[in-house]
Amino acid sequence: MTQTHLITGATGFVGAALVLELLERTPHDIVALVRPNQIGASERFRQALCKAAEVYDSLDLLAELGRCRVVAGDLFADGCGVDGLIDGGVTQVWHAAASLRFENRYRDEIRATNVEGTRRVLALAERLGAESFNYVSTAYVAGRATGSIPESRVRVDAIETNNHYERSKIDAEALVGASPMRTRIFRPSIVVGHSRTLAATAFSGFYGFIRQVAQFRGMVNRTQQGLLERSPVRIQIDLHADANLIPVDAVVHEAVAIAELDTSAGIFHLTHPSPPKVSTSMQTIFELLELHEPIFVSEREGFTWLDEQFDKRMDFYGSYIIGDKRFERARTDAAQTGSEPFAYSSVPVEALCRWYLDTLEASRRNLPVAR
Amino acid sequence: MLSDLVREHPRLLSVSEFFTLLTDLGGRISACFPDSSISAAEFWSILADAPPKLATMLRHEVAMPEVLVRPSPSSRFGVESGVPAILQTTLPYLSDQPEAVYAELERFVATLPSAAVGEHYQQIFTWLTALFGKHSWVERSGGSLRIVGRLQASFPAAKFVHLVRDGRNCAISMSQHLGFRMALIAMQLTEILGVDPWESADRSGEGDLPDELFGFLPEHFDRQAFLDYTTPLPLCGHYWSGEMLAGLRELSTLAPERVLTLHYEDFEHSPHATIARLFEFIGDRVDDEWIDRMAARVRPARSRWTELDPRDLRALTDACEPGFAALAGC
């Protein structure tokens, strides 16, 4: 039976891929709740979907865009600003909109988007009589926990977090968990580009880390050309830690597969079953940026000033690189029984990095010369 | 010190801080040294455009001590318009009526034919030399090792004096210098944003800016945060080493008779001999009495690495090591 799915964050990295996945694998209609910018909500949605379809080599899906209706909305407004614009008939809500910022100055914005925004979307879903509420969270609600991370609720007050972003997602999960609707909380790990084309449409997470390293190299080079090629940086990491990178198409494939099962509910880890190690991923990034191979250490003792600066710049990514987290995914696997599983292969870290560094390079052509 | 020595010289014109300010503390190097020939109007635009970082510093009253001009209601240039680089130090250093000289300079530049930018610079330096009744000019800019390659190309017949100082003292001095602070902040902002925020309105990379740098964007520049900002000594040490490595490499391409390396400490220990050596190299010897007068003015440097605590000193010395190695034998 045809359903109607309401999606927030449809212009974002996971959201746009989700829309394409629903168009490809289901006959359902889609209502996209989009915050208008200077080009308007509809055009913003169209451009985001065209871009995603292009870079994921899925242009044929654009013929299905007629199944999508765009509604201008705003998570900061009461009723998400859509009063009267959406009638009933919404079967499932996907809440993928989020703030991925992390600096302290964005704390209010992060909470307003991720916590209060979730509260408003939940209220809207209830008012529309939606049967299911699917929330795109993050596996890093685990905060500083290490070892085996279960697919279960985190204890809001017990968990130690690394930043405002993690805290906001934990609080949002608590709101979702308390809802009377059937809720699914999807926890992707570090979402990266498409498994086939490598392309991505937004660049936080893994890409943010690469970018920070590139920026650090640029800053140091302006101070002393080639210093980081000659001198290694010491980095505190856990040598056993995984860099749990998961392609965006794997995330939406598994999420849609699970949501298509009427009975599924609860928490699902959308994480790579055999991720690469943080250490090798980091070595690859350094090599591609032509930096001296880093020295991995288990504590900050003995850090030079340069090491400290690098450490400070990478602070946000601490939860990715310090502490060995192994994400359980038994519930995720069980929930997909009977549907075609995503064909996981080993993560092409070098190719992903190369793809992003080329993209990054193109965006940094206007930098002034240093000499 | 060097600018003052040259200014006191009876036959030399001291062109002080011209390139540091014109390049907006290093942010406009390409714009100030275009590859192709430029017209008089294009050259005047280089001279007359108010450098945006310096404008921010003037607007927020955190200008470097070297900047001798302050925007005033009676001035042709105000806080909003900014002040052309040459009017900030170079001309006020030479004249009590810098804006009148500037107006004359504008008329002179308008007569110049299209030429390489180096020829244009030489034309205006020569013009200023004649205007002030001198025989030749010396340009001195702090931190000009950064552009020494471009200076060589622009002034193919010029001689170069490299004034070297113990990197640790230099780093201490840099860490307290507002211009250097601004340059380092701008460098970081530029690398993180992917554009120079004083030259571009693109803020798409703003989310990557750490909180401590956010307040230095030109649109919401925080004066107090700027004054409170600490420029770490090891950073200054790394910078100094970088300048030594790259600058010495570029200076080494010049014929030995075109480069004189002087150590700042030599001015302190044997001022007479060092000053004599300097002007002999420049080619305009002065009498002993004049040298004695100038030697009496040499003051010991204020920055003293020996006063640092052992931990800071170790970190700074480590950062300066590549520079010391590069300088060995100079």
Image: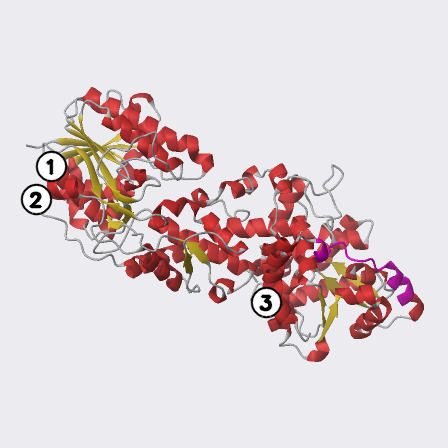
Highlighted magenta segment, given as a residue range: B291-307
Residue B139 position, x and y percent, is: 73, 63
Q: Circle 1 is placed at which residue position?
A: A260
The answer to whether B141 appears left or right of A173 in the picture is right
Residue neighbourhood size for the residue with mark 1, other residues' Cα within 10 Å, grouped as few (<14), some (14–19), many (≥20): some
The amino acid marked with disc number 1 is Glu
In terms of depth relative to the viewer, which is nearer, B61 or B69? B61
Say which residue label 3 marks.
B322
- Magenta-span inclusion, residue B266: no
**How far apart in space, not on screen, are marks 1 and 3 (Cα)?**
63 Å
Q: Is residue A268 above or below residue B182?
A: above
Q: Which mark is residue A249?
A: none
Q: Residue at x 47, y 51 (%)?
A: A300
**Mark 1, secondary structure of its residue:** loop
* Mark drawn on residue A339: 2
Q: For residue B293: magenta? A: yes
Of callouts 1 and 2, the N-terminal one:
1
Q: Pinpoint residue B125: horizontal percent, then vertical percent.
A: 74, 63
User: Is the residue at mark 3 from the same chain as the one at mark 2?
Assistant: no
